[in-house]
């Protein structure tokens, strides 16, 4: 009996061991199978990861610019001008490693056209050749745009400007670089001549505007028409500013011949406040049916004048053939402007079409007696009316041949004349979009629509919370997480007790 019991226990033990062995074998098989699947799955994931990285290294994905003004993207104008350019361009960035936004933006040009290359020089001390050639110190920064033997240099100050009317910093990086590329790749540059004789202000007062004209791929020179015995054949635009005396009969004939040959002119002529006889010059204006009044235009609407200065007229340019392709609203500030009158009755006879470019409000008036010191209209002033102070006149010479004229009833707005505004000493050429208006006028007259004027605002706003808002924010940061933790502990205890 005892022996049978022992045999029975031995059999049960063996049976248990076999069961455990069977379970162990099954677990090993399942682990092996599942482990193999896991290893294969991990291997697949790693392979996919490596494959995606290799693919991304070969593919350049376009960056998405979500800013309102597209400040990190090239404009369509730059893409149109440079996208199909077939000349090699090298852009050298010297000491711009701390200006990542500028470096990243310049790299957009490389993505646009494979003829454009970038060289970064972050240690100028190792490039004695550049330091000597461009007279640089080791810490100076410079951008060099070069094509063949032609090059253009840009400093950091060329990439920004400041609008003292809105107190905003305006980014001109794209404008400067795109126009520099156009400059070094343009073989034939338009010739702009400034007339030097008989003018009231020496051309040195137009140094800034002449300089930026050259920066936009123009050749700028001065000319004495009488001494030169005429206007050169290569003149693409003749610039005449306010006269202090009349031109000669010979000069008048030479200018009219220039007009009849399809010549283009930019006139910056303020009012003839000295009542100087300008009969010969008026005959030039008669070719376009234009007359300049003698008085100074005063603005009667405070919204259209510099604070306290009704002769500082602030207006927006109207929609014309000059402005229709611009991507910016242009406000200008004319100083002591004159009224421009069109001879509408003779327009058809002269073959002239007029386009007002800048006009005043209907509360403007003309003042001829400048001894008057009142900023408001007096009984001696002209009637209130809207005045044209800038215009475009297109004269048809013959079929397929025209002569275009842009006239400003003002020259001071484009000069290096210093004025004090809100404790700032400024040049009138830098007020509002004065400079841009002159540059775009020259581009229009010389049929140079490939030059561009682009302004992008880097607006930054400092947000200051109120005391109540600060309490709410602090509660969200510190109190809310604490409440969530306490609630979690309470729920856990309740569930634990129910068990």
Image: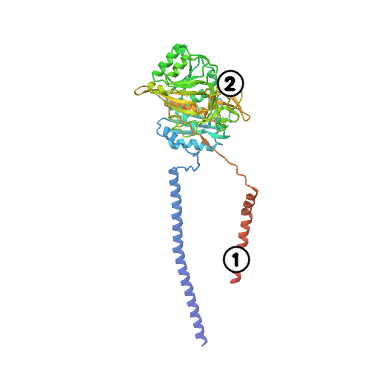
Q: Is residue 355 visible?
A: yes
Residue visible at 42% across and 13% down? Answer: 253
- Residue 116 to residue 226: above or below: below
- Residue 15 to residue 303: above or below: below
* Residue 475 position in % (x across, y down): 63, 54
User: Which mark is drawn over residue 492?
Assistant: 1
In contact (CB < 8 Å): disc 1 and disc 2 = no
Q: Secondary structure at mark 2?
A: loop
* Residue 494 position in % (x across, y down): 60, 68
- 364 with respect to 345 (left or right): right
Q: Residue 476 appears in which quarter of the rendering?
A: bottom right
Query: What number of labels is visible?
Result: 2
Q: Residues within 10 Å of mark 2 (few under 14, many from 20)?
A: few
Viewport quadrant of the C terminus? bottom right
Q: Residues within 10 Å of mark 1 (few under 14, many from 20)?
A: few
Between label 1 and label 2, give the one nearer the viewer: 2
Q: Earlier in the sequence, mark 1 or mark 2?
A: 2
Residue visible at 45% across and 21% down? Answer: 290
């Amino acid at each position: 009996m005892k022996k049978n019991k022992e045999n029975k226990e031995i059999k049960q033990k063996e049976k248990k061991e076999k069961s455990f062995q069977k379970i162990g074998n099954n677990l090993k098989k399942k682990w092996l199978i599942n482990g193999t699947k896991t290893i294969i799955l991990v291997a697949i994931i790693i392979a996919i990861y490596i494959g995606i990285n290799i693919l991304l290294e070969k593919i350049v994905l376009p960056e998405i610019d979500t800013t309102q003004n597209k400040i990190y993207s090239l404009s369509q104008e730059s893409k149109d001008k440079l996208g199909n350019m077939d000349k090699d361009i090298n852009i050298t960035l010297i000491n711009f490693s701390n200006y990542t936004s500028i470096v990243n933006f310049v790299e957009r040009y490389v993505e646009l056209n494979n003829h454009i290359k970038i060289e970064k020089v972050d240690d100028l001390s190792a490039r004695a050749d550049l330091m000597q050639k461009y007279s640089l110190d080791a810490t100076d920064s410079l951008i060099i745009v070069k094509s063949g033997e032609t090059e253009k240099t840009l400093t950091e100050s060329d990439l920004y400007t400041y609008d003292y009317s809105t107190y905003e910093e305006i980014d001109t990086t794209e404008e400067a670089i795109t126009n520099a590329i156009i400059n070094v790749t343009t073989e034939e540059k338009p010739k702009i001549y400034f007339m030097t004789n008989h003018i009231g202000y020496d051309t040195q007062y137009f140094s800034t505007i002449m300089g930026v004209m050259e920066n936009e791929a123009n050749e700028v020179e001065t000319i004495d028409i009488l001494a030169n015995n005429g206007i050169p054949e290569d003149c693409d635009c003749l610039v005449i500013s306010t006269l202090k005396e009349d031109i000669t009969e010979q000069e008048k004939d030479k200018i009219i011949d220039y007009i009849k040959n399809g010549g283009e002119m930019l006139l910056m002529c303020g009012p003839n406040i000295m009542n100087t006889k300008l009969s010969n010059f008026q005959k030039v204006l008669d070719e376009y049916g234009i007359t300049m009044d003698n008085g100074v235009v005063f603005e009667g609407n405070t919204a259209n004048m510099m604070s306290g200065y009704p002769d500082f007229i602030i207006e927006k340019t109207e929609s014309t053939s000059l402005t229709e392709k611009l991507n910016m609203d242009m406000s200008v500030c004319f100083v002591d402007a004159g009224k421009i009158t069109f001879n509408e009755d003779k327009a058809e006879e002269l073959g002239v079409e007029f386009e007002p470019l800048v006009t005043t409000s209907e509360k403007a008036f003309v003042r001829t007696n400048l001894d008057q010191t009142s900023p408001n209209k007096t009984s001696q002033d002209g009637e209130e009316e809207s005045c044209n102070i800038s215009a475009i006149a297109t004269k048809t010479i013959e079929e397929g041949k025209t002569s275009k004229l842009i006239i400003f009833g003002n020259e001071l707005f484009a000069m290096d004349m210093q004025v004090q505004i809100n404790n700032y000493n400024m040049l009138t050429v830098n007020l509002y979009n004065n400079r841009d208006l002159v540059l775009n006028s020259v581009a229009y007259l010389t049929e140079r629509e490939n030059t561009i004027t682009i302004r992008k605002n880097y607006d930054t706003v400092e947000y200051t919370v109120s005391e109540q808002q600060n309490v709410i924010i602090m509660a969200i940061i510190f109190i809310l997480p604490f409440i969530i933790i306490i609630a979690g502990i309470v729920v856990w205890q309740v569930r634990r007790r129910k068990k």
